[in-house]
Amino acid sequence: MKQAVAEAALDYIEFGDVIGVGTGSTVNFFIDALAKNNAKFDGAVASSVATEERLKSHGIPVIDLNRAGTLSLYVDGADEATQHRHLIKGGGGALTREKIVAEASEKFVCIIDASKKVDVLGDFPLPVEVIPMAQSLIGRKLMKFGGQPQLREGFTTDNGNIIIDLKNLKITDPVDLERQINQLPGVVTNGLFARRPADVLLIGTESGVEKI
């Protein structure tokens, strides 16, 4: 299912595009498929060091976002997604760079398998990237949202920060929660993609690829 949905995203690439590429197991299938179609596009902007290395291993040109400017397309996965195309991302820890690339893109195509589609976000822990000196402060502040904050032990982001995972949430208003958490001093960003949701959600199912 992951491979099928990853290959379906190739249809959104236009000749000469520089595309944004996310991070994760489903995106890895997309990168592998890209390698067979690299004559169609001019290069890619990577959302993580791991993605950059995988792109380069396939001989795909990696371009710095500051040089690329506005991207026509961003393709990435998600840890959870709703029918409203609101997402939780960041299970792999690349949420900040993913959010930057998504914001820089005209169209965001999210690719998931059917297990990631949910009615209400929050069963998957919400990642929050935090500047290290604010760890205890943000941990206390996050408790007011009703979940249980837990430091992701032994993990440092590509930006040199830590991640606090906020567990056991039921997120009924993801746009507002994204805004509230991002306003806390010391938070870099959180893994809710609701203010800028996916434009297209492709879901790999046993019977084929569903589009929302």
Image: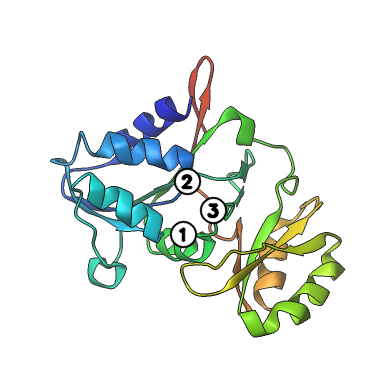
Q: Are marks 3 and 2 in contact (CB under 8 Å)?
A: yes
Residue 181 position (above or below residue 11)? below
Residue 169, horizontal then vertical, whole percent: 80, 53
- Number of residue marks: 3
Q: Mark 3 vs mark 2: which is more N-terminal? A: 2
Q: Residues within 10 Å of mark 3 (few under 14, many from 20)?
A: some
Near mark 1 (Cα within 10 A), the count class, few <14, some 14-19 or many ≥20, is many
Earlier along the polypeptide chain: callout 1 or callout 2?
2
Disc on res. 92: 3
Q: Is residue 180 left or right of residue 38?
A: right
Mark-to-mark CA distance, 1 and 3? 11 Å
| Label 1, label 2: how far apart the Cα atoms are | 11 Å
Give the foreground label among 1 and 3. 3
Q: Which residue is mark 2?
A: 24
Q: For mark 1, what is the residue?
A: 98
Residue under the image location 86 percent in, 61 percent down? 146
Q: Amino acid at mark 1?
A: Glu
User: For numbered disc 1, what is the local secondary structure?
Assistant: helix
Is residue 207 visible to the viewer in this orientation of the structure? Answer: yes
Q: Are marks 1 and 2 in contact (CB under 8 Å)?
A: no
- Please name the amino acid that badge 3 sits on: Gly
Q: Nearer the viewer, residue 46 or 109?
A: 46
Q: CA distance from mark 3 to mark 2?
A: 7 Å
Left or right: where does residue 146 sit relative to residue 69? right
Counting from the top left corner in percent of width and height, residue 196 is at: 53, 58
Q: Secondary structure at mark 2?
A: loop
